[in-house]
Amino acid sequence: MNINSRQFIGSFNTLSELPEIDIPEFCFIGRSNVGKSSLINYLTGKNDLAKVSSTPGKTQSLNYFLINKQWHLVDLPGYGYAKRSKTLRSSWEKTMYTYFETREALVNIFLLIDSRIKPMKSDLDMINWLGENGVPFSIVYTKADTRELKQCKINIELFENKLKETWEELPESFITSSEERKGKEEILDYIHQIANS
């Protein structure tokens, strides 16, 4: 799938503000600083579509983008560590879980995992929650750059082995590097397949 148009729709702080739509939406989530904005920019071919920051927790709203006038890409706040109050983090996490459970237009979540580090409890907890609640999702391993690829592959294997302790079948997964421009076609083809099924 080629992306020919991308339009920022708006940033929404509460679920009641979300647009009423009848087209599929795909959301991207992950721990703070997992490379979410960089991946979104790479996938859409626009370097400043999602704001990239070195400060964890920069995204603090549900950011909607209309892609090819056919589907929405939703950039969600990062979970885990962030330089904001515990009260605000708790509020965002509650909003996020409610969105996952109740948003009818949501057809798939792309859960981003930093392939350079070993399995994190927060990521495993998120995956297990999604599975237990029947929310469709895929795993995207980020930052799998060539210079660190050997270690990344080891970490991915560790992560998948950890999942196999409780999962009979592993979710769909993708290995990406925004810096080295890999993984884009596979993810966009997957989105096209789901959006047109």
Image (tube, rainbow, N blue to C red):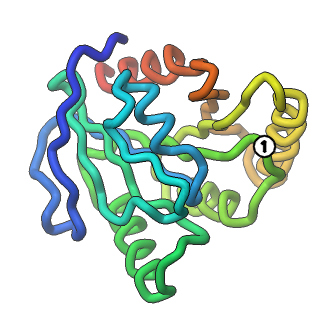
Q: Nearer the viewer, residue 165 or 10?
A: 10
* Three-letter amino acid code of the residue under disc 1: Arg
Position of residue 99 measured from the top left corner of the image (x, y, whole percent): 33, 62
For image coordinates 60% across by 27% down, the residue present is 179
- Residue beneath the point at 53% across and 17% down: 186
Which residue: 24% across, 14% down? 4
Q: Total marks drawn?
A: 1
In the image, taking residue 10 as reference, residue 182 lies left or right, namely: right
Say whether residue 171 is left or right of residue 94.
Answer: right
Q: Quadrant of residue 91?
A: bottom left
Circle 1 crowding by C-alpha within 10 Å: few under 14, some 14–19, many from 20: many
Residue at image point 33% right, 11% down: 2
Residue 160 image position (x, y, % from top left): 79, 42
Q: Would you place residue 191 above or below residue 111 in this image?
A: above
Vertical arrangement, residue 170 with respect to residue 76, above or below: above
Q: Give the farthest residue toward the front.
A: 54
Return the residue found at the far left: 20
Q: Residue furthest top?
A: 2
- The quarter of the picture where the C terminus appears is top left
**Image x and y of residue 38, in percent:** 49, 37
| Snapshot quadrant of residue 175 | top right
105, 46: nearer the viewer: 46
Using residue 44 as the reference point, say whether residue 23 is left or right of it.
Answer: left
Determine the secondary structure under disc 1: loop
Q: Quadrant of the N terminus?
A: top left
Residue topped by disc 1: 116
As drawn, the residue found furthest toward the bottom would be 87
